[in-house]
C-alpha cells in the first residue's frame, strides 16, 4: 500500500510497519472546521481519521492516534457502521468527506467510498495525506478522489530520517505530487460557494530552524511541477509532548523564519493558496480522547 513495502500479511498476526490489519479501525469521524477555507467552508468537513501512520513524525500533533507502538485511540467498526456514522455527520457539513492519513488504509477507504455511493451519497472526497504515497497506489485512485491534500514535509533526506524515519521521503513525495498533478493539473475547481470540487492543495508545515528547507521545497515545486499550484503555508507548529525535549523542535517558529518563507513563496511566482497568522500555533490542537477532537479549538 505504501512506500514502506514491508510486505506484511494483514490477515495474520504479523502486522507491518503501521501495525494495521484488514479491519475498519477508525480513531474519529467528526466535523472539522479548521481546514483550508476551500475545504471546510462555513460548516466544516466530515473527517475520517485513520489510526497509526506510515510515518512516525516526532512532532506529530495527532500523536495520540498516529503512534504505531503505544496504545492509541481507535475503535473497530463494521463497514455498515462506518457508512452510517459518516452519513450522520455529513448531513451537518459542506458535503465533503476527508480521509486523514489514508495511505496505509487505501482498501478500506475505497470500500467506504463505494458504500457511500451505493447509498446515493456523492460528496467530494478529499485524500488528506502526509505525502508518503506510492505512485501505483495513487493511480488506483484516479477518478475516485476529487481533491488531493498532500503534505510536502522535507527536501533533505537526513531531516526526513531524523524526524520521520523515512530517508527516501523527498523523492517519494515529489513523485507522488507529480502523479497527483498528472491527474488534476494546477487548477482548483471551486463551486459557487467557493468550495473545492476537484484539484490539489499542497500543504507545508514550517519547522523551527528549518526555513531554508521550506524555501527549497517551494523551489522544487515551482521548478519541477508548477508555480500555479495552490499552496497552504502553515505556521501552526507547536511542540507536542514528544517534541518538548528535542533541542530543535522544542519551540515555535519565529516571525523572521515565517516571513522569509512567505517572501520566497511570492518571489517564486506562487499566487494561489493560503498563509496562516503566526499565532496559529495556539489553535488546531486536537484531543482525540474527545468525541469531537476539535471541540475545544478556536478557529
Image (spheres, rainbow, N blue to C red):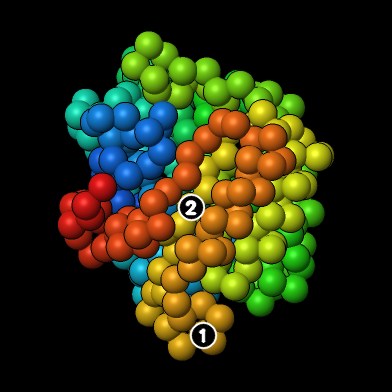
Instruction: Give the residue drawn at x 81%, y 39%.
Output: 224
The residue wearing badge 1 is 246
Q: Estimate how packed mark 2 is, as few (under 14), some (14 to 19) or many (20 or more) residues with alpha carbons within 10 Å.
A: some
**N-terminal-most mark, 1 or 2:** 2
Q: Is residue 27 above or below residue 257?
A: above
- x%, y% of residue 111? 47, 34
Q: Estimate how packed mark 1 is, as few (under 14), some (14 to 19) or many (20 or more) residues with alpha carbons within 10 Å.
A: few
Nearer the observer: mark 1 or 2; the answer is 2
Q: Is residue 96 above or below residue 241?
A: above
Q: Is residue 240 visible?
A: yes
Instruction: Give the residue drawn at x 52%, y 18%.
Output: 189
Q: Nearer the viewer, residue 99 or 94?
A: 94
- x%, y% of residue 212? 69, 63
Side of 65 where 140 appears, left or right: right
Instruction: Give the residue drawn at x 52%, y 35%.
Output: 273
Q: Nearer the viewer, residue 272 or 101?
A: 272
Distance between mark 1 and mark 2 Cα atoms: 20 Å
Report helix, strand or loop for mark 1.
loop
Q: Nearer the viewer, residue 164 or 136?
A: 164
Residue 234, which numbered label? 2
- x%, y% of residue 186? 65, 25
Residue 15, which numbered label? none
Instruction: Give the residue drawn at x 40%, y 57%.
Output: 278
Report helix, strand or loop for mark 2.
strand
Q: Tell me whether circle 1 and circle 2 mark residues in contact (CB < 8 Å).
A: no
How many numbered callouts? Answer: 2
Q: Is residue 8 visible?
A: no
Residue 265 sits in quarter = top right
Side of 285 where 206 appears, left or right: right
Q: Is residue 29 above or below residue 112?
A: below
Amino acid at each position: 500500500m505504501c512506500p514502506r513495502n514491508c510486505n506484511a500479511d494483514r490477515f495474520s498476526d504479523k502486522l507491518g510497519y503501521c501495525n494495521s490489519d484488514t479491519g475498519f479501525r477508525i480513531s474519529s469521524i467528526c466535523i472539522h472546521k479548521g481546514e483550508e477555507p476551500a475545504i471546510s467552508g462555513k460548516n466544516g468537513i466530515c473527517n475520517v481519521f485513520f489510526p497509526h501512520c506510515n510515518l512516525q513524525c516526532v512532532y506529530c500533533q495527532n500523536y495520540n492516534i498516529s503512534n504505531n507502538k503505544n496504545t492509541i485511540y481507535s475503535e473497530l467498526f463494521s463497514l455498515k457502521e462506518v457508512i452510517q456514522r459518516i452519513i450522520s455527520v455529513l448531513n451537518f457539513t459542506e458535503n465533503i468527506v476527508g480521509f486523514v492519513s489514508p495511505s496505509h488504509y487505501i482498501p478500506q477507504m475505497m470500500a467506504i467510498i463505494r458504500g457511500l455511493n451505493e447509498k446515493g451519497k456523492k460528496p467530494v472526497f478529499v485524500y488528506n495525506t502526509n505525502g508518503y504515497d506510492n505512485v501505483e497506489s495513487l493511480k488506483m485512485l484516479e477518478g475516485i478522489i476529487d481533491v488531493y491534500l498532500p503534505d510536502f514535509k522535507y527536501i533533505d533526506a537526513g531531516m526526513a530520517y531524523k524526524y520521520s524515519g523515512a530517508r527516501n521521503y523527498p523523492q517519494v513525495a515529489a513523485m507522488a505530487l507529480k502523479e497527483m498533478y498528472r491527474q488534476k493539473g494546477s487548477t482548483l475547481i471551486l463551486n459557487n460557494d467557493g468550495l473545492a470540487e476537484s484539484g490539489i492543495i499542497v500543504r507545508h508545515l514550517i519547522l523551527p530552524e528549518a526555513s531554508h528547507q521550506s524555501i527549497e521545497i517551494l523551489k522544487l515545486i515551482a521548478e519541477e511541477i508548477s508555480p500555479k499550484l495552490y499552496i497552504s503555508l502553515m505556521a501552526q507548529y507547536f511542540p507536542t509532548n514528544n517534541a518538548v525535549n528535542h533541542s530543535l523542535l522544542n519551540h515555535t517558529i519565529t516571525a523572521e523564519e515565517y516571513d522569509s518563507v512567505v517572501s520566497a513563496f511570492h518571489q517564486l511566482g506562487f499566487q494561489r493558496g493560503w498563509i496562516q497568522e503566526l499565532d496559529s500555533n495556539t489553535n488546531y490542537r486536537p484531543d482525540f480522547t474527545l468525541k469531537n477532537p476539535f471541540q475545544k479549538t478556536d478557529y
